[in-house]
Image: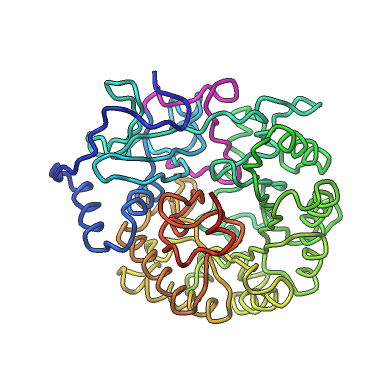
Amino acid sequence: MPSPTETGGTGTDTTRTGPTGSGRTRLVEQLMERFPHVPREAVIKEDLLRGGVAFDESALSDNEHGDVKPKSYFIFSFDHGTLPELGAAALRRPPEEIVLTGGPYGLRRTVVSVRVNPASPYRVAAGQDGVLGLYLDGRRISDVGLPPMPDYYRHTLENGKSVMEVAPTIQWGYLIYLTVFRVCQYFGAKEECQYCDINHNWRQHKAAGRPYTGVKDVEEVLEALAIIDRYDTAKTSTAYTLTGGAITSHLGGRDEADFYGQYAKAIEERFPGRWIGKVVAQALPKADVQRFHDYGVRIYHPNYEVWDRRLFELYCPGKERYVGRDEWHRRILDSAEVFGPRNVIPNFVAGVEMAAPSGFATVDEAIDSTTEGLRFFMSHGITPRFTTWCPEPTTPLGRTNPDGAPLEYHIRLLDAYRSTMEEYGLSSPPGYGPAGAGRAVFSVSSFMDSLAPDQAAPEDGAAG
């Protein structure tokens, strides 16, 4: 049986072997050769994130009763199929993340968020030695480690809810992800972001009879955090993110700043300084952003999603209707006056730029547009970050673009991101752990893996 913990395998061939003749293997190796300054770990990681990975049943977990930390579905599905389409992976959950090491490419430790795709050319399976490996086109390309079940997941709240349901951790335990509102008030085809499955993910978990709390009670969150604080003796959990769907009017009598801010206020009062507090919310007026800061939030993520004006209007119709692209960008710049530019980190969804039928037709055009956005924000000292787009099949863009964006786009984006940071003399954003290949834990894109050692922030560079 494969080891359930992050241990390297034995007997893995670490010498370089030639391409098998498979188109996917050939493409991966060609990109490694074309972009030698992009870590080869990032090339494979981006391909796994954009296209997903299949699992043999031996690599699936026993949910919350086994030795492997299971996938929590913390906000989106991040899968290439609905739960009914995933087969065994819907009943016995896949791991939250996997870690890759060794193999013919000599991979340094690489943490990858799991996105299940039964049709993927990548498969996690046990070799003849019983040790899990990652196989591409039938060829073993790395050892695979699975995240051990954390002690705090083995405890429940007084009402019986699991810690994983209330306060799951990702990024190999670095980040507590608090999705305190699991649906979005941008609703329907005329408002929902065209790549986002937050509302469907809520519906599918409820339909499957899984616990999936819509609005999390503040006291439940505090109780779950107390369990984490007690049993996370190594202090691996370093940050928390407060997030959820957009609030266009009020929820529980509170506007968006006060709804999410009430959790930050309670956490900081109960656990002062224990974790780095982050909030992902809409780009709000400066007075609302000040409330976040006053509540104790240290990092603000007003995600701008996609840079191109036409694509923003098409792909984010609710955000365009309620705020508008220009105002969204103005509010991002205004928020830097409250938090400081370094602590404003807006996300964009890397890959939707090339989604048919409206996206850019060539990688050159898409990279030029995205880089224009990077230069706009970085010229103001603001460092965006990105999530690699997973084309979930229940979203409009996922249905029409099941293969996502070309891998070349993602590799060139890493190159453009790194060079634009160098141009403006910026270092890795705070709250994401260490930077650099073999060190990064940020699992839903490779931007932290791809940064050079001299681009790591002092606090990250000193991390273990």
Residue 399 location (% of width, % of height): 42, 50
Q: Tell me, yes or no, whether the highlighted magenta stretch contains residue 355.
A: no
Q: Residue at x 59, y 46 (%)?
A: 174
- Is 237 situated above or below 188? above
Q: Main secondary structure of the magenta part?
A: loop
> Which residue range is magenta in the image?
56-80
Q: How is the image coloured?
A: rainbow
At x 79%, y 37%, the residue is: 220
Residue at point 26%, 35% (across, down): 140
- The number of numbered discs placed on residues in the rendered structure image is 0
Q: Which quarter of the rendering shows the N terminus? A: top left
Task: Classify residue 183 as left or right of residue 409.
Answer: right
Residue that extends furthest to the top in the rendered view of this protein: 1
> Where residue 101 appears, x then y in whole percent?
36, 40
Task: Determine which quarter of the picture holds residue 283.
Answer: bottom right
Instruction: Please tell me whether residue 394 is drawn above or below residue 378 in the rendered image.
Output: above
Residue 304: percent from left, percent from top: 57, 68
| Residue 31: quadrant of the picture | bottom left
Specify whether residue 64 is painted magenta. yes
Image side of residue 150 versus residue 252, left or right? left
Residue sitting at 54 percent across and 68 percent down?
384
Which of the pair 68/376 is nearer the observer? 68
Residue closer to the observer: 146 or 362: 146
Could you tell me residue 51's position as x and y percent? 36, 47
Looking at the image, residue 376 sits to the left or right of residue 58; the answer is: right
